[in-house]
Image (spheres, rainbow, N blue to C red):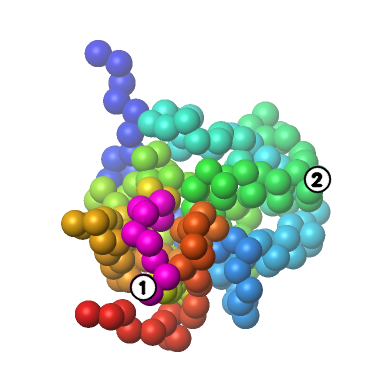
Amino acid sequence: MPEKKDWTREEIQRDYIDTMTAVTIPVDIKMDGTTRIYDLSQSEAILKKARIIALGNCDCREKVQACDNPLDVCISIDKDAEYMISKGKGREVSLDEALAALRQSHDAGLVHISYTDKGEPAPLIICSCCTCCCHSLAGLIRFDLPGAVVESDLIAQQDEDACIHCGVCVDRCQFQARSIEKGTLKFEPTKCFGCGVCVSTCPVEAISMVKRAEMKPQKD
């Protein structure tokens, strides 16, 4: 019997939750940035400050092989980039190539997450993750490990009058915050981590990203 390709709860806790902070990164969202939450323009600013950028394959999708999402979208910065290049696990790329990788993975519905090693002032890795393969998102969903991912300070705001209940956002949501029940879209804000992948494909622009503190109450 072939080895089962999956992350165990122990691996996730030991190798990731105990050593890294993973933070969701909204893309193409205008916001006042902090040092931990990044939109595309802020990601660009981080990459512009990098001495060197490397692009490599996603370790999670290579290990688990549970989907056909893009592989070559894992971004390493500075010393992590040098390490990945030295080990043959990444190649040096330009800023434009790194941003193109972010856009490709966003279009595929992947969640952008920055990983900051404990003791480091800034992220050294920007990944594009899926719940079927990623150690952090898989841990959050399968094992109920909220410490695997730190939510963005943004949240999806639903325009319930504009929504046509088509279900496109349901398929995009990696956090299972959306569902269709009896033909009606149901959104559970407590499950939303603020990645923003639901926004760009809504056909009627019924979803926007707002600060969590500014979110309007949903209609009953």
Residue drawn at x 80%, y 45% is 94
Q: Nearer the viewer, mark 1 or mark 2?
A: 1
Q: Which element carries disc 2, helix, strand or loop?
A: loop
Which secondary structure type mostly characterizes the magenta part of the structure? loop
Q: In this view, does 211 lie to the left or right of 124?
A: left
Residue drawn at x 38%, y 62% is 164
Report if residue 163 lies within the magenta region: yes
Residue lying at the far left in this picture: please name it: 182
Q: What stretch is highlighted in magenta?
A: 160-169
Q: Which element carries disc 1, helix, strand or loop?
A: loop
Q: Is residue 190 left or right of residue 193?
A: left
Crowdedness near tag 1: few (<14), some (14–19) or many (≥20) residues, C-alpha within 10 Å: some
Crowdedness near tag 2: few (<14), some (14–19) or many (≥20) residues, C-alpha within 10 Å: some
Q: Residue 37 carries which label?
A: none
The span from disc 1 to disc 2 (Cα, nearest Å) is 42 Å
Q: Give residue 35's position: percent from left, percent from top.
A: 61, 73
Q: In this picture, is 19 found above or below 62?
A: below
- Can you identify the residue that label 1 sits on? 160
Q: Can residue 58 be seen in this view?
A: yes
Q: Give residue 15's position: percent from left, percent from top.
A: 41, 47
Q: Give residue 48's position: percent from left, percent from top.
A: 79, 60
Q: Is residue 113 visible?
A: no
Q: Residue 94 carries which label?
A: 2
User: Of callouts 1 and 2, which one flags the residue occurring earlier in the amino acid sequence?
Assistant: 2
Who is closer to the viewer here, 144 or 31? Answer: 31
Q: Which amino acid does label 2 sit on?
A: Ser
Report if residue 34 lies within the magenta region: no
